[in-house]
Amino acid sequence: MNKAGTDKVTTLDFARRKKAGEPIVMITAYDALFASLADSAGVDSILVGDSLQTVLAGEETTLGATVDQMIYHGRIVQRGTERALVVVDMPFLSYQVSPTDAVRNGGRILKETGAGAVKLEGGAAVAPAVEALVTAGVPVMGHLGYTPQSVHRMGAGRVRDRGQGAFEKLIRELKALENAGVFAIVLALMPAVIARRLTEAASVPTIGIGSGPRCDGQVLMLHEMLGLGGHAPLHVKRYAELGDEVLAAVASYAEEVRQGKFPGPEHVQKV
């Protein structure tokens, strides 16, 4: 049951919610079925993450995601969504080469998926790409802290920016993104005290993941919170253990087929 209203969520609603102190709820999804369930549950935004490479494709990193993949998954997520704002990740090297490339690829994603925005990683270095996208009419969500597309340079899955001067560095990156026109910024895997100070200093909403409770909203990977897959990171709360249930269900099906118990008379078409 949708408990968050029925009006379509827009980027302007993000700004209104920060001003009103209303937390923003975001979650990942990669297909129409899960998107429909998340949308019906009342989330405000659905992120079609390039994490589909690790979650769905079994790759070790997100780097192999392509623009065509993101468009395909973005389109089917949008098809299953009525209310939530759909945001699609721009994959590695789709925006870093030049602002022209960023506009071409971001424009394709928005046009061919029907989504409401794109997301890209980085601070001042990607500000020209952000500005070009926003000028072209493509809403952009930023992303600071742990950036999976920089895994080979920064390492995987560690809390970032713990050292002295971390806040000063991050606030410069944040302000560069704000000045370029982002409507929100994901703060990923950073100390809670830093994320809180950034949120207080930001004029746009912050969406935290592994960055403490004082961001303007939170995002989790749907498969992790549902208990689908392997070990969940520290910042993930398991709201279900569907992996165990799926395993048990498929094992029961296999056993019944082998024992001749399925299909039973109730599953057979009558003449």
Image (spheres, helix red, strand yellow):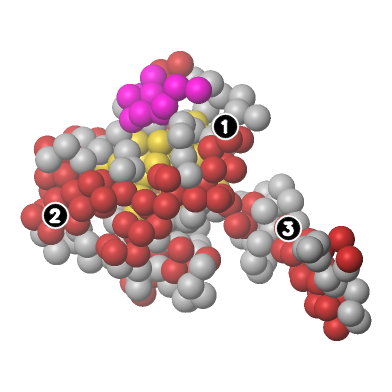
User: Looking at the image, which residue is at 37% across and 52% down?
Assistant: 74
Separation of marks 3 and 2 at Cα, in angstroms: 39 Å
Give residue 104's mark: 2
Pick the quarter of the image with the N terminus. Answer: top right
Q: Residues within 10 Å of mark 3 (few under 14, many from 20)?
A: some
Question: In the structure shown, which secondary structural element does the residue marked by tag 1 occupy?
Answer: loop
Residue that label 1 marks: 42
- Mark 3: amino acid: Leu
Pick the quarter of the image with the C terminus. Answer: bottom right
User: Looking at the image, which residue is at 91% across and 81% down?
Assistant: 259
Residue 223 location, x and y as percent?
60, 57
Residue 138 location, x and y as percent?
21, 41
- Mark 2: amino acid: Arg
Residue that label 3 marks: 242
Question: In the structure shown, which secondary structural element does the residue marked by tag 3 occupy?
Answer: helix
Magenta segment: 6-16
Separation of marks 2 and 1 at Cα, in angstroms: 32 Å
Residue 236 location, x and y as percent?
63, 52
Against 198, is 48 above or below? Answer: below
**In the rendered picture of this protein, how many numbered marks are placed on residues?**
3
